[in-house]
Amino acid sequence: MLKAIIFFFLREKRNIFINKFVLPSRLFSSLLNILFYYYAANAFLPNEMIFEKDSTWSLFEFVMVGELVLFFVTDSLVIYTQQTRTIIQQNILDPLLNTRTPLYQSIILMGFSSYLLSSLTIIFDIGILYFFFDFHYPIFAVSKIIFLNLSFLFIFIGIGMLASAFLILFKRGGTFLGSVVGTLSIASGAYFPIEAFPLWLKIILSYSNPLFILLSESRKILKGQTTEYTLLLICFVAIITGLILLLASFYAFNYSINRYKEKGQQIILGT
């Protein structure tokens, strides 16, 4: 498995870093993103009805923590369909189906290789925020958040692989998935507290949006506040839910592949 991850990592590296200017450009874009949030946050005063006067959050810190915490889980929602789409468009679907490694496993390993490359950006962001913007948190709290993120990752990998199965089966869905990811992100409280929404919508989001639950609990842990649930309980529920979704995606993926083999037709992807 490690050899496969290294192989896909090198393949991903060749596809993304096509010349020596790509990595510096990505890091520069990431720096611009941080500066944009910093100056935008300084330009607007938070609404005191939403951000309490005694809140320990600045608007800039609130948004940046939101982006960092949700970095990998939101990637997971789209990365597997992107890999599946690439495999189909490059006409290597049939060759991969004829290898000893199941396609389901290959796509997950491709996703892991993409995480490794994405880690370069997030490490760069953390370094900038730590050294230049004084983002300092207890190491124990950060460790808890990493563990919490890993627990929730199962859920989003499962959803991502389900989306890949639907892409093969229905030959479309990229636009819809992008809309879903955007909606979930906005409704997660990443960029503003969900208190800005009507009360009925806030209640629904508090219990139905896993992105909100992950982010809300993470922020409380960072600030040493009392969390609504115990960490172990959240992680246990997240892992069990994720394993169920992974199992469902496995069967859905295999079904879509079997349907493809039965039809024997080339897949032409829509939006």
Image (cartoon, grey):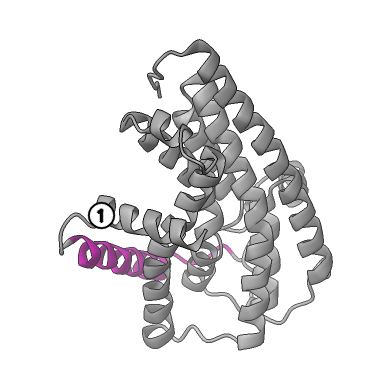
* Residue 31, magenta (yes or no): yes
Q: Note whether residue 26 is visible.
A: yes
Q: Is residue 185 above or below residue 17?
A: above
243 displayed left or right of 104: right
Report the residue at 84% width, 65% height from top: 233
* Residue 42, magenta (yes or no): yes
Q: How many other residues sit within 10 Å of disc 1, few (<14), some (14-19) or many (≥20)?
A: few
Residue at disc 1, secondary structure: helix
Q: Position of residue 192 (x, y in %)?
A: 56, 58
Q: Position of residue 126 (x, y in %)?
A: 43, 76
Q: Is residue 251 above or below residue 132?
A: above
Q: Position of residue 266 (x, y in %)?
A: 39, 17
Q: Which residue is mark 1?
A: 14
Number of on-image labels? 1
Question: In which image quadrant can residue 144 be found?
Answer: bottom right
Report the residue at 39% width, 81% height from top: 127
Report the residue at 56% width, 55% height from top: 73
Report the residue at 74% width, 51% height from top: 206
Q: Note whether residue 49 is visible.
A: no
Q: Which residues are magenta?
A: 22-47
Q: Nearer the viewer, residue 249 or 203?
A: 249
Q: Position of residue 161 (x, y in %)?
A: 58, 40
Question: In which image quadrant can residue 22 be found?
Answer: bottom left
